[in-house]
């Protein structure tokens, strides 16, 4: 059995994530409180919808902060992988919450469209500007971390979509102020909800695939088997499992039939070659190989355990 490690996240990177998340949490709690009060006073459903989304941002930020801290905990006898999947689980929860919030907003938008109400547009305008500035700052804080971390990407999307929602609310407030188009409040709420579903669905699928141990989309099992079988003493590669533990670690597990009854030292040399091939060609950084010679077992590439 062999493990070749390659980790891109430094301790400083995690600390930076944590600090930026805390700043964003404080900002979003303030924005949420202001929007709830303003939405009740003004009667704006779009503002209350934006407040609800902001509140979901607070929850998602807290979940991500907890996951960010858990992932740094060391492995133990009871937790041999540690908490390496904490951020993937957080990403799944946050992506699911985006879609749930969106469905709730759509229901409320349809109800308000049927029963439009006059809205205090000045309050809506000023509060939406505050929300745009607050969420915009949070988006800038987390932007660099969102590029290579699924957990941070879901939080980034929460905040980015909320910023876009606040811009939509601002536009709606201006239209209501100058043209008295009250139904725009419901229309914008519905549009925000659709946008949330589109953004959340892709991340929900991605995190679900990792949690379910699916083969990464960019990985070809057949190509990996062909590369390994091209080595001189390798007769057959079977019983293959490929999965992501998290975004940094992709694992390969397989049984290999050898043409000769090779020594353990010879196997170590071949194992090194396999590790190099799958790392360079397929980005796999953890390899676990079971060597076999003349063993009578299923020789299919995929064997249901």
Image (cartoon, rainbow, N blue to C red):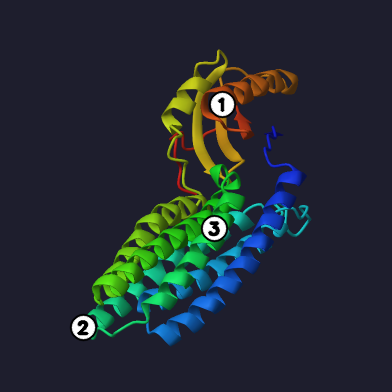
Is the residue 243 above or below the residue 138 in the image?
above
How much space separates mark 3 and mark 2, taking CA atoms?
33 Å
Residue at the limit of the structure toward the top, as seen here? 232
Q: Earlier in the sequence, mark 1 or mark 3?
A: 3
The one nearer the camera, 187 or 216, is 187
Tell me the CA gap for discs 2 and 1.
59 Å
Residue drawn at x 35%, y 59% is 195
- Along the line of sight, the residue nearer the viewer: 115 or 203: 115
Measured Cα–Cα span from mark 1 to mark 3: 32 Å
Secondary structure at badge 3 equals: helix
Residue 278, label in figure = 1
87 up-or-down from 125: above or below: above
Marks 1 and 3: which is nearer the front? 3
Residue 9: where, in percent of width, then height? 69, 42
| Residue linked to disc 3 | 155
Image quarter of residue 46: bottom left
Between 218 and 145, the residue placed more toward the observer is 145
Residue plotted at (51% across, 50% down): 210
Asked if labels 1 and 2 touch by Cβ distance under 8 angstroms, the answer is no
Q: Nearer the viewer, mark 2 or mark 1?
A: 2
Sequence-wise, the earlier of marks 2 and 1 is 2
Question: Disc 2 on helix, strand or loop?
Answer: helix
Q: Position of residue 117 (x, y in %)?
A: 28, 85
Q: Which residue is mark 2?
A: 114
């Amino acid at each position: 059995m062999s493990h070749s490690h390659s980790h891109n996240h430094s301790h400083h990177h995690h600390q930076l994530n944590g600090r930026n998340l805390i700043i964003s949490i404080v900002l979003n709690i303030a924005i949420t409180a202001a929007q709830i009060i303003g939405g009740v006073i003004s009667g704006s459903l779009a503002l209350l919808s934006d407040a609800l989304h902001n509140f979901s941002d607070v929850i998602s930020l807290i979940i991500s902060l907890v996951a960010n801290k858990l992932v740094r905990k060391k492995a133990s006898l009871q937790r041999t992988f540690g908490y390496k999947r904490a951020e993937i689980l957080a990403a799944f929860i946050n992506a699911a919450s985006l879609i749930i919030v969106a469905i709730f907003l759509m229901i409320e938008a349809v109800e308000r469209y049927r029963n439009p109400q006059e809205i205090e547009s000045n309050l809506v305008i000023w509060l939406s500007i505050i929300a745009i500035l607050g969420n915009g700052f949070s988006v800038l804080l987390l932007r660099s971390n969102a590029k290579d971390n699924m957990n941070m990407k879901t939080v980034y999307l929460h905040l980015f979509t909320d910023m876009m929602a606040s811009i939509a609310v601002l536009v709606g407030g201006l239209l209501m102020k100058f043209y008295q188009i009250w139904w725009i409040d419901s229309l914008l709420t519905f549009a925000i909800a659709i946008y949330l579903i589109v953004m959340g669905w892709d991340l929900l699928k991605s995190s679900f695939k990792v949690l379910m141990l699916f083969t990464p989309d960019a990985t070809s099992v057949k190509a990996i088997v062909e590369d390994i079988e091209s080595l001189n003493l390798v007769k057959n590669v079977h019983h293959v499992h490929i999965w992501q533990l998290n975004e940094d670690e992709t694992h390969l597990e397989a049984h290999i039939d050898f043409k000769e009854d090779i020594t353990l030292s010879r196997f170590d040399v071949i194992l090194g070659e396999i590790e190099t091939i799958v790392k360079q060609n397929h980005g796999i950084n953890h390899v676990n190989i079971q060597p076999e010679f003349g063993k009578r077992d299923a020789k299919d590439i995929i064997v249901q355990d």
